[in-house]
Image (cartoon, rainbow, N blue to C red):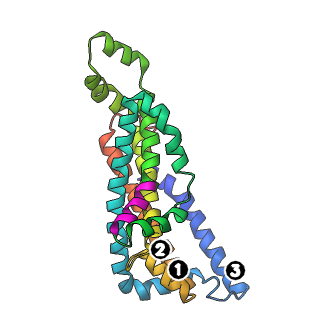
Amino acid sequence: MKRWWSHVWPPFVAVLFFLIAWQLCTSLFDIEKWILPSPADIAKQTAEGAGGLWGHVLATVKLTLEGFVIGTSVGLLIALILHMIPFLKSALYPLLILSQNIPTIALAPLLMIWFGFGLLPKLIVITLVCFFPVAVATMGGLKQTDRMMLNYMRMIGANKRQIFTKLELPHALPSIFSGIKIAATYSVMGAVIAEWIGAEKGIGYYMMLQKAGYRTDRMFVAIMIIVALSLMMFGLIALLEKWLVRWKPKQES
């Protein structure tokens, strides 16, 4: 508990000072609420509007989880295929990097035109932002396999399946989870962007409505929810990693 608190209190104090400075600035300079509401105004709006937001939060969580599972699965599958077939890796890896140079916010409207306003284009948007960190981290982890152990397993006659399941995959797990944790936070962002472009419910849709009404305080409430969802996704993946990768040294965890 003491060790946990020693890690937590520095950022906690920094956030507390930031909120106090924010509150003082809005009061001292008499900033209009529609430009920059104070933390107290945002907290008040959070308490008053919590009931109406619940449906939007559930819609975003459902979309995020569906997109995250698909995006992570696609990333793992691509990484495994490219690892098994080096020729394909040489041919397709530059295209994977190129795909990340296209802004999601520019691609999303095209997906809406091609696939309509249903669930499919939203899942594609989340998959596009999730698969790349998982694929790159997995390929990097598989490439860093201990060469001495690899040569030893080949010498004793291990086949490719045994080398993969008993050596390459276990050694790559920390890298894989690093990519999945990044994808977990990106998945929330992808869901909000997808809802922003076209949806009837969700945090992204809620932010569009509040933007039109200049309700800056409600926009900040939505941002807080997005941050909380991203932290929850990251924390759940970190706990899963801690449970699965038990052999990882403490100083690295």
Residue located beneath label 3 in the image: 25
Farthest top residue in view: 155
Farthest front residue in view: 114
Residue drawn at point x = 47 percent, y = 41 percent: 136
**Is 185 located above or below residue 174 in the figure?**
below
Residue 120's x, y, as percent?
A: 35, 64
Secondary structure under tag 3 reads: helix
**Is 165 located above or below residue 135 in the figure?**
above
Question: Which residue occupies the foreground of this view, 208 or 155?
Answer: 208
Residue drawn at point x = 49 percent, y = 31 percent: 90
Q: Which residues are magenta?
A: 119-128
Q: Is residue 17 left or right of residue 189?
A: right
Residue 150's x, y, as percent?
A: 37, 18
The disc at residue 196 is: 2
Q: Quick one: label 2, few (<14), some, or many (20+) residues within 10 Å? A: many
**Is 12 located above or below residue 210 in the figure?**
above
Question: Which residue occupies the foreground of this view, 14 or 38?
Answer: 38
Q: Hey, what amino acid is under mark 3?
A: Cys
Q: Is residue 125 magenta?
A: yes
Q: Is residue 57 left or right of residue 102?
A: left
Viewer-nearest of discs 2 and 1: 2
Task: First in sequence, mark 2 or 3: give its number.
Answer: 3
Residue 101's x, y, as percent?
A: 57, 52
Secondary structure under tag 2 reads: helix
